[in-house]
Amino acid sequence: MEPLPSMLHDSHQSPCLSQNSTRVTIAYRPLSSSNSFSPLTRRSVFAAPADQARRISHPETPRLRNSLDKTLSPKEHKEVPVTTSTKVDFEYKAPSHTAESLSPALVVLPAALIGTWHNVNSSTRDLVKIAISAAGSGISVNPYGACVPTPCNWGASSGIVYAPNVSSNHAEAFSADFTFSFAKAHVVGHLVGKELLVEVFTIFTDGSGRSNLYTSDTMVR
């Protein structure tokens, strides 16, 4: 390929031309009256000189300038501002885990659960009552077993409250765990209208051979 000196004249830039069989690289060095020069700015003009040389007629034409602008190396490209979306994405394993608003409630208020709940079945062999009180951002849960003549006090344990959806701040359910010398009990409850359905999952750990136990009781305040 023949040199292209007539195509590289510019009153503001002094070109240096290097060429190989597959690519032409034009390096521009700004003219200066001093002895210090700024670093070379390289612009790769042709992907294949034989295919592209005929497209350039003069450095001052829009075609050449557009060609130079389109072939800037990645480092010379200006960064384009990216507008970020306000949508918040959450990880989930069920659709109900996704947020219904962009500001999920951080604290679930337990007011609807607070109080002493009594079993509607006076002959129950499970829990006769359960006392729930506020404790910081959570609750304290204290069940009582149907022992006679005095109900068995399970003691108080910290509970966790749950809302009906991920954007609500009103408690509708709770859970609490209890550990005894012979068993572990997981107590959960949720509101059904004005009643509280309490379920207990008990795992016996004393080697007695007793099956794991599930019980449920309906309670009212």
Image: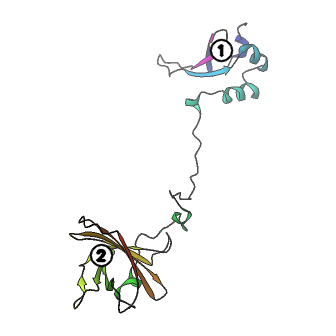
As drawn, which residue projects farthest toward the front?
209
SS category of the residue bearing label 2: loop
- Span highlighted in magenta in the image: 16-39
Which residue is pictured at 35% across the width and 91% down the height? Answer: 123
Which residue does the image show at 59% across and 42% down from the upper left?
80
Q: Percent from the top left, x then y, of residue 13?
A: 62, 20
Reading the image, the residue beneath label 1 is 24
Position of 148 with respect to 86 (left or right) is: left
What residue do we see at 22% from left, 90% from top? 150
Is residue 2 positioned above or below 91 on the image? above
Residue 127: x and y, percent? 32, 84
Residue 171 visible, this angle: no
Task: Look at the numbered disc 1 and give the secondary structure of its residue.
Answer: strand
The crowding category of the residue bearing disc 1, from other C-alpha atoms within 10 Å (few below 14, some 14 to 19, many at least 20), is: some
Quarter of the image containing the C terminus?
Answer: bottom left
Numbered disc total: 2
Mark 2, residues whose alpha carbon is within 10 Å: few (<14), some, or many (≥20)?
few
Give the quarter of the image for residue 219.
bottom left
- Give the label on residue 172, or none: none
Viewer-proximal residue among 140 and 82: 140
Q: Where is residue 7 in the image (x, y as percent from the top left)?
A: 72, 16
The residue lying toward the viewer, choosing from 63 and 47, is: 47
Q: Picture coordinates of residue 27 (x, y %)?
A: 59, 18
Q: Look at label 2 and name its amino acid.
A: Gly
